[in-house]
Image (spheres, helix red, strand yellow):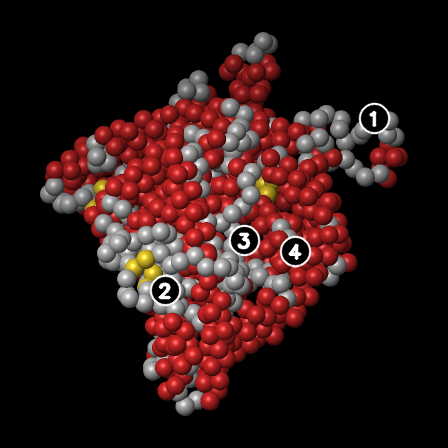
Amino acid sequence: MSTINDRLKENLNLPISPLSAQAIADAIAAMTKTGNSEKMAEASERLSQVASALDDAIYSLNKHIQHKTKKIQDATTAADMPMAGGLTNLAKKAEQQLDDKKAAETLTPDKQFAKDSLPTIKESRQNYDDWEAAEYEHETAFNDLRENIDDINQGAQAVDYVDSQLVTQSIANTLRTIADNDTVVEPEHAILVGLAIDDLARMHQEVIEGKEGKANDNILNALATANQKMRGEEVDLPYATPPQQPHLFDASGVNATQFTPEQNAITADGSSKIPPISEPVAIAQSYLGKPGELSEQVNKIKEQLTPVGLMTGQFNHQNLINSLYDVEASIDTDTAPPWTWELLSSLENTVNGMQEKSLLPSPNDYHKVAKALDAIQHSTDIDSKQAKKLNNDLMNLRADLMQRNENAKHVADYAAAGKEEIEATEQNMGAWRESGYTPDNTLSALKDNVDTLDDIAETTHYDEAEQLSSLVSTILDRLHSEQTVPFDYVSDSVEQAVSEITDISKQYHGDTAIDESLLANLSGQASDNNVGQPLSDFHPSLQALETMHPGYHQPMGQTAGEQSTGKQSTLADLPPGAGMAAIQRGYQDFAREAEPHIEASRQHFDEWQYTDFTDERPLENLNEKMQQLSDVSGQYGMSEGVELGDSVCDILDRLYNGAISPNTKTTNSVSSAIDEFERAASAINQNAPITEQRIRSELAQEVREVAASGDLGHPMTSGSTDHKAFSQRKRERLAAFAEEADKPIAASKSHFGEWQGSEFEAREPLDNLSGSVNEVTELSEKHEFDSAAQLGDAVGETLSRLRDNNLKPTNETADHIDDALNEFTRSTTVIKTTRGNPEISDDVLTEARKMASTAMLGEPLSGDAAESISSAESIKELPEQLTEQIAKQAAEQVAEQVAEQAAEQAAEQAAEQAADSIVGAEMSAHFTAFAEEADKPIAASKSHFDEWKDSEFAAREPLD
């Protein structure tokens, strides 16, 4: 130990910060105090490695400083060039972070700037989302994004917020490179811009909260890599720390390999100066870890294991191990429980095991490692039993590494054997997507590819790919044989599975377990009764394949015998455009019929918006047009359009019935739905790719969620100007209903009294009551009095069931009917007096609906009553049947004999023939019972016909 201290004293010009020196001193002191021989031996071994390396590091670091200084100066000179590169930004960062008076002390970012710039960052995120929705075409959103990022960058420079400068400059460089390229940017490059914007928002929020707001080096490196790749340059990460080198930091956290001329080094006399240049020697290889805030050290490890860290290829095993040392150095040894060291050791052994087998961490590993790190960070909240379980999880992970190594080999064999087939599968998957997922020969080709990959997976023992390809093949075979276009969720599952069996690179972690939800989806879809829409649904005239290609089922040159024994041709054997043409025709018809409704919907929405969404008239008109759009969508096989239209109608119904003033989210969802119909119709008219012509299922899902939510807005305040206006307009519109419904409502009460007087057994008052209620319901619908129409439907359904089943209502059923009739009366009275709420009571409506759907409405009528009703029904229905039959035959006879006989003679003859026909029917054994009872009504029918004939077939009463 004295040797180390002596070397530190003799070489105080070493460019090592006080924090780093203190860390070594603390470690020495800890070793001196500890009574644990195992910890002492471990610490001694690591410290001896540091001691042997310190001598070598002294000279090499001095040389390294000079080298870095020159690179920074060169980079600063190049800062005005179009692409200054990572070192220029790094130089600016170092220069602005340090000053001459306070070495290693960072500047505090400006809180007001961070707060003022947040709206611009949010706007930038919206610009990115719009750009992404446009499939990264260079449109307005892209240009707006560049302008906003430049504004933030300039503001960050003005207040010396270095990390914000770094991120915004990296984004700006990437966007400039994208703009300079002729081709559309690859999604994996563009997505990094969105991640960087999100991280920028995090940084500024942290500054507002009084934190440092540090940039994420992983994201900066990812942007630099993407930028250099797009420019065709050699990748040289400006923020990466080379593995296997010592991580020596100063107090500000700046890496010792990134010193600038302004950085102070501690000398023997305590002054600050640049160390002298020495001869180069070997770089030190040992690293004890850098103590710091434990939560930050833990998060640094998590970031390396996130999808971003793994996706960008920046993960390094040694860096992760060094980060574990940082965690270890940051733990409070006085309060940490004993299991902490065991858990840390287990984490290090796990990473070492992956490195030995050249395995990358998998997404599943991230969760296990994160749980262990969280336990170390919050050790006081974890007991030894929980810690043991976490340690067992890590041990199980290490135990699986051997199998994962074997899996990775199988994947590599699969990739090598199926290289060409994998490429062909990806191409045909894209071709099938472009064809609108139609069952043509692109589907056939894709199925052949998947079947071949299934065989290769079986041969190379890649079990997961074999399982997925088998399920996908089953689904594709169904779509092929059933001539079906898959539902969106089916095509999504197929695409995800195809991606799993063709994207090999991510499987080199060896953790090849299939996503359980994907497996469940595919298994269900392979056996579902319905996985899509038949091709004929996309156009009403497409009832068979011959409608598109007459005679196709019998190819030329094929005999009847050959046809019967050979394979029958289907649409899947046609050229790719055949199925596409069918869908395209349906979509074109949809666009043609939907456009007037779309235009009217937008007009009604604008009118509604003009009234601050308080006038119900444009709301009702909009509802009507959206329902028509839903109907047209269903007519031409656009299921997403049906879903979207119905969801909007649900929203509008709730707003109207509840007198609700909608919130911004609700109105935006309605407006977005109209925009989506307009976008789809425009795409159809412009003959855009078939996938763009469809209503986007994700938007339909969003609107459906809004419709199902409990928060559409707030009810208009009673007594407010808006509510008074709303109520007044509604009363004016319902006044016509009240005037016309008075008589049928009064009649229904009268008929109910007669029915009640017969102890609910007489049929005639029940029939009359049902007719009156139906008339009230029709008037309610006519005047758009929705709650009254709903009550009328419920009561009408109840009365219909009682009548059809010859039931006598229970007392409870009768009371509910009476309550409903009284509610009609109350509502019309309110409408006339303009006092109170004219809407049907929710309680009455709820009970009426329950009544209509209950299984037990009443009990069967007594035998005499039932027989009386049955006879009355027979007598009532027979003249109607005979009248219809006789009238039809009479009309036919008149038409045939009009040139020879007078109309009166023809009608009489037709009546006699019809009557004779009915009498003849009496002799049939099947109508024996009818013949015995029908004499009187038949005679009555002839009498009524004579009366009708005398009126020259113009009178209504004898016809009835």
Q: Are marks 4 and 1 in contact (CB under 8 Å)?
A: no
Residues 870 and 277: in front is 277
Q: Position of residue 671 (x, y in %)?
A: 34, 35
Helix, strand or loop for disc 2: loop
The answer to which of marks 4 and 2 sits earlier in the sequence is 2
Callout 2: few (<14), some (14-19), or many (20+) C-alpha neighbours within 10 Å? many
Residue 603: give its label.
none
Q: Which residue is mark 4?
A: 468
Instruction: Work out whether mark 4 precedes mark 3 in sequence or the reverse, and give the earlier one.
Output: 3
The image quadrant that residue 825 belongs to is top left
Residue 556 is tagged as 1
**Mark closest to the chain's N terminus, 1 or 2:** 2
Label 2, on which residue? 13
At x 23% / y 56%, what residue is drawn?
Answer: 101
Give me the residue at 66% from left, 29% from top: 577
Residue at image mark 3: 313
Identify the secondary structure beneath mark 3. loop
Residue type at mark 1?
Met
Residue 141 image offset from top left, x and y in percent: 39, 33
Residue 145 against residue 39 in the figure, above or below: above
In screen coordinates, is 378 left or right of 391?
left
> Given the image, on which type of amino acid does mark 2 rest?
Asn
Crowdedness of circle 4 by 10 Å Cα count: few (<14), some, many (20+)? many
